[in-house]
Amino acid sequence: TWTVQKVDAQKYARLVVRFTNPRFSAGTGDKKIVVEPIAGPKPGPLARTMQPILKELSDTAIVCVISPAGEFSRIELPAKAEELMSVQGDSTDDLFSEPWLKRLLGQCLPALPLTPIKVGAGWRQRFEISLPTGRLSTDWNFTYKAAEKEPGRHRIALTTSVKQQASTGAPAKFKVEAKSSQGQGIFDTAQGRWAELKLQQTVLLTQDLDLFKATYTVTTTLNIHAK
């Protein structure tokens, strides 16, 4: 849930975000693990690590400051939540840290142009993540397609592209290539928010450890609907 507390003179909005029943899932092929905030009877290693984080996330109010274009300029977490949710990794963005949350929330509510645009015009928003193998950038490319029949609703097409910057001294050669991406959203000017946003992106990940080389196909699906 999103609750607007105030909008200042520069039109920056202060919001409070709360997650209801957050879940973490991971897996390959037919095998999938889903972790929820409430512990099961026999939690495995992943569940024991993630459940305290998910429970704290579900109990925590996250304060966000959003620019007039819709970009998250600042995110505030209580000290207790910051301490618990900081999962350290070498040269990586901490899970549930401010950069991680900015990327997560920014993908739920992408930014918009500050000035009116015409049909066919486009804009871009970049999301970045630090990994042990380097820095990965994903560009979200938006194109305004048309006004819908329902007043105030506008259809926007979305594609993505990825770019990798390898780090020196990485333990393995890691290559990311975009295979396909397709999505679209509906922005409601009457409500001042995204009414829906859908995206499916497939990338190829190639890992070279000298002794062997492995290639993975990873598909990410985003599906957001405003209530």
Image (cartoon, rainbow, N blue to C red):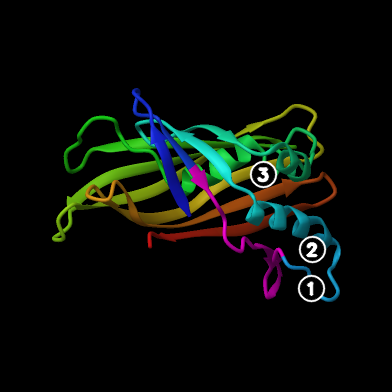
Q: Identity of the amino acid at label 3?
A: Phe
When the figure is inspected, residue 39 is found, relative to residue 189, above or below; the finding is below
Question: Where residue 148 sits: x, y (%)?
Answer: 17, 57
Contact (Cβ within 8 Å) of mark 3 with mark 2: no
* Residue at (17% x, 43% y) in the render: 119
Which residue in the structure is indicated by mark 3? Answer: 96
Residue lying at 70% horizontally and 42% vertically, measured from the top left? 174
Q: Residue 219: image x %, image y %?
A: 55, 60
Give residue 186's position: percent from left, percent from top: 29, 55
Could you tell me which secondary element the residue under label 1 belongs to?
Answer: loop
**At 59% across and 42% down in the image, what residue appears?**
101
Mark 2 vs 1: CB contact within 8 A: yes
The residue segment tinted magenta is 16-37
Residue lying at 59% horizontally and 53% vertically, measured from the top left: 204
The residue to which callout 1 is attached is 40
Q: Is residue 171 above or below residue 154?
A: above
